[in-house]
Image (cartoon, rainbow, N blue to C red):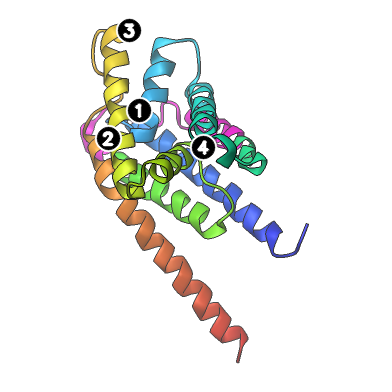
Amino acid sequence: MSSSLFPRILLFTAGLYIMGLGVALSVAADLGTSPISCLPYVLSAATPLTMGMATFVLNIIFVLLQIIILKHGFKIWHLLQLPGLFLFSFFIDLNNFLLTGLVPDIYAVQFPVMLLSCVVLAAGIALLLKADLLMMPGDALARAIAQVSGKKFGIIKVAFDVTLVAVAAAVSLIFLQGIVGIREGSLAAALSVGFLAGFFRKLLSRREQTCTRLRGR
C-alpha cells in the first residue's frame, strides 16, 4: 500500500465513523433524521432489522441499481463501495447503542442535539470528500442516474433525496399507521448539511495549504 493511500483510508474511515455518529445523534434527538437515513429509520421501526442493517440492505439495492443503470459502465472496483458501506452501517448501530437514553425527551435539549447532528454529519461528509476514495452507494446511484440522463448531479441528488423521504413516509403510513422519522430535523438536514459540508471542506483545504506552506519554510 502506498504511503499516500494509507492516510486517505484512515481519513475515509474517520469520515464514516463521524457520519455514523451524526446519524445516531439525529436518532437520539428524535426530531427526524436526514433524507438518506429516513427510510432505514422507518424500516428499523417496522421490522426486526437494526438501523445499521436496514442501511446496509437499502444501499445494497442502490449498488444493484447502479449495475442495472450503468451496465458495462459499472466497473469491478465500484464494488469497493461495499466495505465502506459495511463500516458505515456498523458505525450507525454502534453509536445508536452508545447514545441510547442519553438525550431526554425535552424539546429544549432535543433541538440543539438535532442541530449538532447536522454539523457532525456534514463534518463526516467533508472528510469523505477530502479522502477522495469512494462515494457512498446513494450518492453513486445519483451520479449514475445523472450520467445516463445527462442531468446535473445536484438536480438528481435533490430529486433522489425527496424520493427517499416520500418512500419513507409511505412505508411509515402503511406499516406504522403514522409518520415517524420525518420531522423538522429532516428539513434542517436537507437544507444545511450540504452547505456545512462545503464549509468544512474549505476549512480542511485551507489547513492543508497552511501546513504545506509551513513545511516549505
Q: Which x, y percent locates residue 162? A: 27, 33
CB of mark 2 within 8 Å of CB of mark 1?
yes
- Residue behind mark 2: 186
The residue carrying mark 3 is 175
Q: Are marks 3 and 1 in contact (CB under 8 Å)?
A: no
Residue found 21% across the figure and 34% down from its top: 184
If the image is split into quadrants, where does the N terminus sit? Answer: bottom right
Which quadrant of the figure has residue 197?
bottom left
Mark 2 and mark 1 lie on one chain; the one further toward the N terminus is: 1
Range drawn in magenta: 85-111
Instruction: Tell which circle, 3 or 4, labels the residue nearer the N-terminal end.
Output: 4
Q: Earlier in the sequence, mark 2 or mark 4?
A: 4
What residue is disc 4 on? 70
Name the mark nearer the viewer: 2 or 4.
Answer: 4
Q: Give how far apart the Cα atoms at labels 3 and 2 are.
A: 20 Å
Residue of label 1: 38
Mark 1 is on which residue type?
A: Cys
Residue 166 placement, left or right of 150: left
